[in-house]
Amino acid sequence: MILLSTQSISKSIGPKTLFTDVSLGISEGEKLAIIGTNGSGKSTLLKILLEEEEIDSGQIVKNKELKISALLQDPPFDPEQEIIDHIFETENRLFSAIREYESACERLETDHSEEAEEIFNKAMSEMDRLDAWQVETDFKSILTELGIPEIHAKMGTLSGGMRKKVELVKVLMEESNLLVLDEPTNHLDVETIIWLENHLSDMKKALLLITHDRYFLDRIVNRIIEIDRKKVQVFEGNYEFYLEKKAEIREVEERMEEKAKSFLRKEIEWLRRQPKARGTKQKARIQRYEEVDGREKFQADKKLELASIEVRQGKTILEAKHLCKSFEGKPIVNQFNYHFRKKERLGIVGPNGSGKSTLLNLLTGRLEPDTGIVIPGINNVVGYFYQTSQELDPSLKVIDYIKKKTGESITMEDGTKLSAGKVLEKFLFPGDMQHSLIEKLSGGEKRRLYLVEILMNNPNFLLLDEPTNDLDILTLTVLEEFLVDFPGCVVLVSHDRYFMDRIAGSLIAFRENGELVQSHLSYSEFLDEEKKRKSKNFDGKSETSSLSQAPPPATKESTSSTTPEKPKKISYKIQRRITELEEKMEGWEKEKSKLESELPNVATVPDKLIELTKEIQTLDTNIHDAMKEWEELSVANS
């Protein structure tokens, strides 16, 4: 069943044409993605389908059974509203019943009056009548999965990532058969991205999304809608299939363009040899030349390339010694030691709020450590691409902004100068766009302009904090190519697995209490190992090493002696503690297995389900802490 279709729709904003003659359909249960460069009209097309934007021409046909739930970028919210009220802010009677039931449960915890019991029983009856128990269970389950424990927190107190999670709960709970998502992975930590990826893959609803996350695209969608040069083309398949077909199309277009150029060269030579008076055949030939010359010319994808000048750096790029930073008594960075190397590609990973941006700010001196020091290298030129772009003056034209920030030109690696306009062209800002006001740019185009500003200053120590947010796939691809050849040191913070797998040569990962560990695995491999570590099923050698302590200096005795050391004898006290920990972990594992076996029996009893889930989480924490202590004692005394 076709839920929605468009017939020859077109859209322009001012003098700029976004797309023309778009005809496509969305069928029940299929999963589609819209891709294209920033400013090509992806979000506008979504808004048109949601009837939030008018079309210039064409027609949109909607099935009477169509029900859409949508999450667009930066949805509005009331800062004083509680999470639960924001999620259930709808006229849907089912949601109202769940909200009333939750309120009745909360009141009954402290108020045991007859009135409170009567309200509770009435809410229970309404839940039964509407058969709302499964929906309520799903609601609690999603909250738990996304790590939203406090549903009465005010929306205004939440971080950007937590607000995104709340919006996801809201849109996933709504009754619909078409889910529309605009950049759903922005500001989410990787655990949530993977959860959402799995949830959407299993979902029976139709899906239409915009995302720059290429793993996400590859694993979820079965059709890709591309907006390219004002036209829309549909590719049947996932992202890998799209790349293969796109390469084939580009190859054909290049051959056709070369043939057209060859034809024009021959025709020009012929025209030059002919007398002024021309017959009918000659006029027809001239007309054919004019038709070919006036064709829509093929343009190869522009490369985001800028040869960076390598400023000679000393042996030490940057060194961190015993860095510590806490906020309100909570350790964020704890005894961090690291020696940054030339041409290093280092990824920093961890959950939202773990301290990744804090670490970058400590390294650049924007934040003072509680203890420890940062020793900068010689001739370091730092380029810091912040997670949220700095405010760009909306009244300035693109070209004027770059000239104001970086000058009229930049000196290239071979000594030649490149004007600001030419640099902007390399960064996908053509001539007409350079004279547009910044206020006319899309969010992604502003991020790209901010990136131009950073790279035009020729940094040799580059810090990128969530650079993939709001950038289109083409820009990400060519940014990756730039970073691969970049002669300086690069430090990346990103949840984009594809981007990190391609660029980062090693990782620093945040763990509990500000502990940082280093890994030489790829990001995807590291995530797999972390999953095994947390499930306590991994007992092989770890590919991570702690950065919380500086390695002791080697002594002559330790390096020259070949006599093997005698194994240290474990004290009775330590051995007793190790045994005690093993017994406790065994008991907790048994208790956890028992509770997990009870979960199916209480699936329809929300309060009991939450209670059991919390108990299991507590056991997981106990097991994790005990395992950590057991490993430390075992290693220290082995």
Image (cartoon, rainbow, N blue to C red):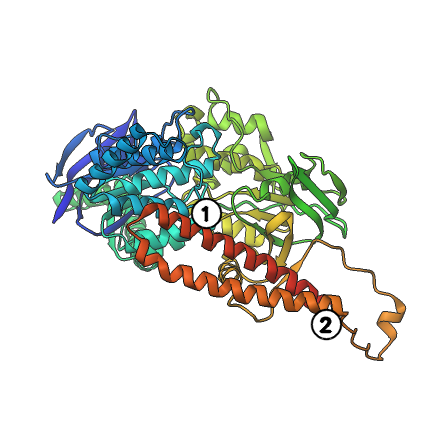
Q: Residue at x 36, y 37 (%)?
A: 167
The x, y position of residue 590, in whole percent, is 47, 66
Identify the residue at horizontal 20%, vertical 42% (top origin). 128
Q: Amino acid at mark 2?
A: Ser
Tag 2, which secondary structure?
loop
What residue sits right under mark 1 in the picture? 476
Instruction: Give the vertical position of 14 relative to 512 (above or below).
Output: above
Please rate how many residues cluster around mark 1, counting C-alpha atoms within 10 Å: few if below 14, some from 14 to 19, many from 20: many
- In the rendered view, does 70 fall on the left or right side of 632? left
Q: Quadrant of the C terminus?
A: bottom right
Residue wearing tag 2: 638
Asked if 158 appears above or below 32 in the picture, the reply is above
Splitting the image into 4 quarters, where does residue 188 fall?
top left
Residue 309, image x, y percentages: 64, 45
Q: Position of residue 436 (x, y in %)?
A: 41, 26
Report whether 191 appears left or right of 290: right
Residue at mark 1 to residue at mark 2: CA–CA distance:
47 Å
Looking at this rendering, what residue extends furthest in the right direction?
556
Type of the residue with mark 1: Leu
Q: Is residue 70 above or below residue 634?
A: above
Query: Taking 595 as reference, is 181 left or right?
Result: left
Q: Nearer the viewer, residue 138 or 578?
A: 578
Q: Disc 1 on helix, strand or loop?
A: helix
